[in-house]
Each structure stands twice: as C-alpha cells, then as structure tokens.
Amino acid sequence: MFVPIGNTPRDYAWGSHTAIAGLLGSEPSGGPEAELWLGAHAGSPSRIVTDAPEGVDDLRAWIHSAPEQALGPDLARRGARLPFLLKVLAADAPLSLQAHPDLDRARLGFDREEEAGIAVDAFDRNYRDAFHKPELIVAVSETFDALCGFRPVAEALAIVDELGAADAAGDDPQPAALDLLRDRLSGDDGLREAVEWLLRDGRGEDTGEVSWLVERVVALAAVRAADAASPFRAAFETVGILAAHYPGDPGIVISLLLNHVTLRRGEALYLPAGNMHAYLRGLGIELMAESDNVLRGGLTPKHIDIEELVDVLDFSPLPVPYLRPEQPGAGVQTFRPDVPDFVLHQVRAADASETPIPLDGPAIALCTSGDVAISGAHGETTFGRGASVYITPDEGAVTVSGDGEVFIATVGDGYA
C-alpha cells in the first residue's frame, strides 16, 4: 500500500529561507524553513494527503488506529511505533552543540524524570521519551559543514599553540588566557577536564576566566583565519561564525576541540550515541531514530545539564565518522549504520530499474528530483519532485523506475 504524505517545514530560526523549497520545488514561505519532518513523531506527524482512512488525517493517528496494517504485525507487537524519522534539514546558521544518549541511558533517564514528576515539556527536562537518537545525514547541497566528535588532544594543543603564536605577535599579548585551556588539555583526561571546566565556569556566577578565554580565542582566531596556509583555517573561520551568532558562549572554544568536516554532495555522516556535534551550514537528508532526547552543550539559550551531558559524552578522540554507502546494485546507494532502527537508500531511478530494494518493514520515500515510479508486491505509485509516500511493509521489495532521484527510509535488518 502506497499512501501519499506531506508536511509543513519547521520554522526554527537557524533554517534557510530558500533551500528546502529549492530542493523540493515548492513555494518559499517567506520565513526560515529548517526541517521538513516525514514520519509519525508527535511533534509534527506527516499529513495523509489523499485517501486517508476514515477518522484519521495524519500518519501517527493511522498507525495508532491500525498498527498491523500500517506497520506490520511484528512492529505492531513492539508498541505500535514507527522507529525512524526522515527529515530534510536546511541550516543557514549553526545549530547547538549536542549529543544523544544510548538506549539504556535514555530508558533510565526517562524513568527517573517521570518518577520525579518533571513535565515532559518542561524547560529542564532531558529525556522526553525512552529511546535513543542516533542519526545520519547525507549532504544534498554542494557542501555541508559540521562539527562532530573530539579531535586528538595533540591536535587540539596544536591549535592552542597556533593561537599562542598569534597572541605573542600581537600588540597586547595575554598568554595566560590560552594557558588556562592548555593546562587542562594537558591533564590525564584532558578533553573531559577542558569541556567540563568551560561549561561549568562559563555558565556559573563567576565566568571571568572563561569569558576572558573566549574573548581571546575569538580575537586570535580572526587573525589565524586570514592565513590560507594554516591547517586549522576552517576551525578558526568557524570560531568567527559562532561568535557572530552566540557571542561569549563557551561553546565557541569547545568547537576547536571537535573535528570540523565539510561533506561534499552525496557524502554522509553517522552520529552515534555520545558524539558531540553541531551542524553549521548546508542542506541534507537526515534520518534518525524517532526520539526527542537531546543533551545540549553550548551555542543555545536552551537548557544545558552539564553533569548529564558529560556523563553521556564519548571523549575518545575519533576520526570523522563518515558513513560509506553500500552499493547493492546499479543506481542504488545504501547507508546502513550500526543500529537496526533505520536504513537509507538513495536511488537514481534511471539506473535502478533492475535493482530490487528490500524493505524489512514500513518505509517512507521522498522524491528530490524528476519523476519516479515505485512498484511493490501489491501495488505501485508514481510521484514527482517534492512528493513523498508511506509504504506499508506488505509491499516487500520494491523497484524504482523513472528519471528522478528518491530517498527511501526503512528499518534495518532484524529490527522487526
């Protein structure tokens, strides 16, 4: 069964005014359009565009009213919940620094806050549900910039040293400011110590040292960003961008401790539990486990629970978490993370007509260019740029033909 669905983009302030409309061929709203949600999340469930079952008008309501039909018997028994959420994300300004909990911590945190009587929509609530929120993003703009995961300590210290050289060459050297950061990074658990200090002292009653450090880092990074030969030029340019949007925020300094990555069109990142990250600028297709559990670490006016965040973060220095696609057949790239909640297929219809795409559960397909036809075991549908459909699991493997591009999100092997 193929069910046409749609939604209205979320108008978060950091969103682009044109990128989502440009990708999907729709009329811009005139305001920021940050995220288009395709799924059954309570915050913005997709509308059923045509042929809605009687008495329901959105995907969430239909799943609750007919879980076996909408999800299949296996997922219906697991709580009648669509486990993934597909998004189009368009960032014209930096998002907050954030990380997500693993499944065990999400369950414990949710139960703890429920027992404490904290309202689910309270400002200081950390866990709004009992689920984890790993996510992947595929760049569809020519470039997509992000911060993700911690650099090696030696690399972070090299950045501090480069700023120190700029400080020494200036008219008013203040080396003690950078020494505050260098000393903490040089400890036995340097990344944890530095991040915890920046967050605690940068948000307490006495923010003098951290405020001084942020001020010096912003000034010195502007000097180093002008040097095309610097290996850390992108990181220094990012400091200037963050300072313009979040002046004085300690997250500006934390950004220097994180990997900076520029994805090219078609490249992807996978962000598992504990990975501190922030999207900076670009347009992408994002797929995640359906959850609202976000622990923020700066660049935001929203709630920051420092102790919970530090406990959740993985401070292990790691390379940029690229997610390399599988290529199961002509015209198809499959992004498969190490969790069973979701898989994303990117399909070039003109090349993929002979490549079956297995669906291990329900799926959502979004057409981003041209026109495509999708056929399954019981039916078929044709739709064009900007349109999306929900596919029930009884369709089994599907084939795609036409002249466009379509992204298909579904559950991974063994989830059901």
Image (cartoon, rainbow, N blue to C red):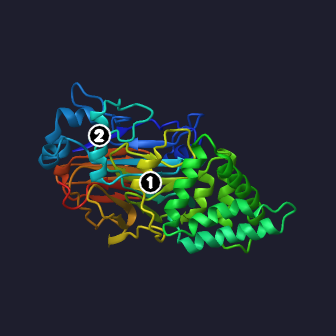
| Residue located 36% across and 52% down the image | 101
Residue sitting nearer the eye, 136 or 380: 136
Residue 399, image x and y in percent? 27, 60
Q: Give me the residue at 63% from left, 62% from top.
A: 181
**Left or right: 285, with 356 as reference point:** right
Identity, as a three-letter code, of the amino acid under mark 1: Val
Separation of marks 2 and 1 at Cα, in angstroms: 18 Å
Residue 206: horizontal and vertical position, in percent?
63, 43
Residue 217 x/y as whole percent: 70, 58
Q: Is residue 373 above or below residue 112?
A: below
> In x, y percent, where is residue 83?
27, 48
Q: Tag 2's secondary structure?
A: helix
Position of 119 relative to 173 (above/below): above
Label 1 sits on a secondary structure element that is helix
Q: Are marks 2 and 1 in contact (CB under 8 Å)?
A: no
In this orientation, which residue lies closer to the viewer: 66 or 398? 66
The disc placed on residue 403 is none
> Mark 2 or mark 1, which has the lower sequence index?
2
Crowding at mark 2 (Cα within 10 Å: few <14, some 14-19, many 20+): few
In this view of the protein, which residue sits in the foreground, 303 or 177? 177
Farthest right residue in view: 171
Quarter of the figure with residue 216: bottom right
What residue is shown at x 48% (from left), y 66% (from top)? Answer: 189
Tell me if residue 385 can be seen: no
Q: Nearer the viewer, residue 169 or 300?
A: 169
Q: Is residue 326 above or below residue 287?
A: below
Q: Dot 1 corresponds to which residue?
A: 310
Amino acid type at image mark 2:
Arg
Instruction: Confirm whether residue 157 shows in the render.
Output: yes
- Determine whether 396 is above or below 259 in the image: above
Residue hosting label 2: 112
Location of the N terminus by quadrant is: top left
